[in-house]
Image: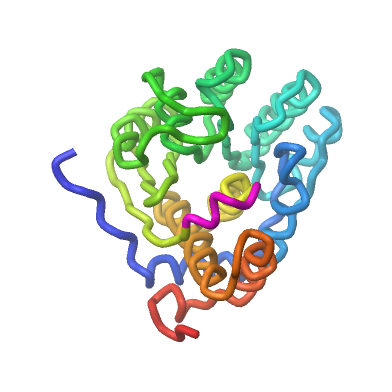
C-alpha cells in the first residue's frame, strides 16, 4: 500500500453508537465455549441483547428471529459445525446478516477447510487477526493458535482481497485495526496491550461487529465503529486497571458508560 488508511472520525463512530442504542439488536452468538459469558456481558453492557442457542434445530429457528448471527469457530466440534451451518442457512433465507470469526484458521486443517466453505455462504463481515485473515485469503501466515504472528497493516491487502472475493466487510485487528470493503478502508486506533491479556476481547469484538452490521448506513463505517467503541472502552479501562484481574470489570463499566463525547475526544475522566 502506498498510503495508510485514514483514521475513522469520532463523529462517524458516535453516529453509529447512537443508532445502535436506538435499535438494541438481538445477536445470536454461536461462539466458543471459553468466552460465552464474557461475550454476553459485553453485549449487555453496550445495550444489545445476546442469545446463545446452540442446538442445530433451535439454532436454525433462532437465527431467523435474531437481528444478526455470530459464528465463532474457537472451540469447533462436529455438533457445533452442524449448528453453525443450519443457523447460517436459516439466517440467509431470512435475510439476516451473519459474521464470521475464523479463530485459529491456518493453524488447524479442519477448521481452515470449514471456514473456507463458510465464506462461500456470504458473511456480512469477517473479523480476525492478521494471521487468520492471511490464511483465510490463502496466503502464508505465521499465527500460533489464536495469537497472530503477523502485523495487521501487512495483512490489509489480503483483507481487501478477501472482501472483494466474499462481498464481506473485513476487519483485521491488531495494534491498529483495519477495516475494508475491498475498495475503501478505515484505520481504527486505540485500545491497550492489556486487552490481549484477558481472554475473549477479540471474540467479544466479533459479537459487537455482528450487532453493528444490522445498523442503517454504510456497513464499512458501522464495522469500523464497532472496533472503535471496543478500543475506546479498552483504553479507558486501562486508566484505572492495575492488571488483567481489575481490567475486566473496568472494561464492562466503560462499555456501559461510553458516550459520543468520549468518541469525539471530549469528556476525558
Residue situated in front as seen by the camera: 258 or 16: 258
Q: Is residue 225 above or below residue 52?
A: below
**Between 213 and 265, the one nearer to me in the picture:** 265
* Left or right placement of residue 119 versus residue 199 in this view: left
Q: Residue 100 placed where, x, y %? A: 57, 35
Is 19 inside the magenta-drawn segment?
A: no
User: Compared to 226, does 11 lie above or below?
Assistant: below
Q: Residue at x 32, y 52 (%)?
A: 186
Which corner quadrant holds the N terminus?
top left
Residue 195 in the magenta stretch? The answer is yes
Looking at the rendered structure, the number of numbered marks drawn on it comes to 0
Residue found 72% across the figure and 48% down from its top: 66
Residue drawn 82% across the image and 28% down it: 56
Which residues are drawn in magenta? 193-199
At which x and y percent is residue 265? 38, 78
Q: Please state the horizontal and vertical placement of residue 6, each as a whole percent of the image.
A: 25, 56
For the view shown, which residue lies furthest in the front direction? 242
What secondary structure prevails in the magenta region?
Answer: helix
Q: Position of residue 177 (x, y in %)?
A: 40, 49
Which one is nearer the viewer's eye here, 62 or 169?
169
User: In this rendering, would 54 be left or right of 169?
Assistant: right
Q: Would you place residue 191 above or below residue 202 in this image?
A: below
Amino acid at each position: 500500500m502506498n498510503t495508510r488508511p485514514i483514521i475513522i472520525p469520532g463523529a462517524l463512530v458516535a453516529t453509529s453508537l447512537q443508532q445502535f442504542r436506538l435499535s438494541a439488536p438481538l445477536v445470536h452468538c454461536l461462539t466458543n465455549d471459553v468466552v460465552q459469558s464474557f461475550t454476553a456481558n459485553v453485549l449487555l453492557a453496550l445495550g444489545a441483547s445476546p442469545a446463545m442457542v446452540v442446538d442445530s434445530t433451535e439454532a436454525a429457528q433462532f437465527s431467523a428471529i435474531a437481528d444478526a448471527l455470530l459464528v465463532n469457530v474457537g472451540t469447533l466440534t462436529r455438533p457445533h459445525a452442524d449448528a453453525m451451518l443450519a443457523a447460517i442457512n436459516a439466517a440467509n433465507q431470512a435475510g439476516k446478516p451473519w459474521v464470521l470469526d475464523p479463530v485459529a484458521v491456518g493453524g488447524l486443517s479442519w477448521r481452515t477447510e470449514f471456514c473456507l466453505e463458510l465464506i462461500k455462504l456470504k458473511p456480512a463481515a469477517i473479523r480476525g487477526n492478521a494471521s487468520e485473515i492471511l490464511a483465510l485469503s490463502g496466503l502464508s501466515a505465521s499465527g500460533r493458535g489464536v495469537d497472530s504472528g503477523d502485523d495487521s497493516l501487512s495483512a490489509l491487502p489480503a483483507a481487501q482481497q478477501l472482501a472483494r472475493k466474499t462481498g464481506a466487510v473485513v476487519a483485521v485487528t491488531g495494534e491498529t485495526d483495519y477495516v475494508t470493503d475491498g475498495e475503501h478502508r478505515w484505520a481504527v486506533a486505540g485500545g491497550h496491550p492489556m486487552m490481549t491479556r484477558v481472554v475473549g476481547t477479540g471474540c467479544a469484538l466479533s459479537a459487537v461487529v455482528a450487532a453493528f452490521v444490522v445498523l442503517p448506513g454504510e456497513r464499512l463505517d458501522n464495522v469500523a465503529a464497532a472496533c472503535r467503541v471496543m478500543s475506546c472502552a479498552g483504553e479507558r479501562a486501562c486508566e484505572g486497571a492495575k492488571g488483567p484481574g481489575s481490567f475486566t470489570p473496568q472494561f464492562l463499566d466503560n462499555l456501559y458508560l461510553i458516550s459520543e463525547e468520549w468518541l469525539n475526544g471530549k469528556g476525558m475522566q
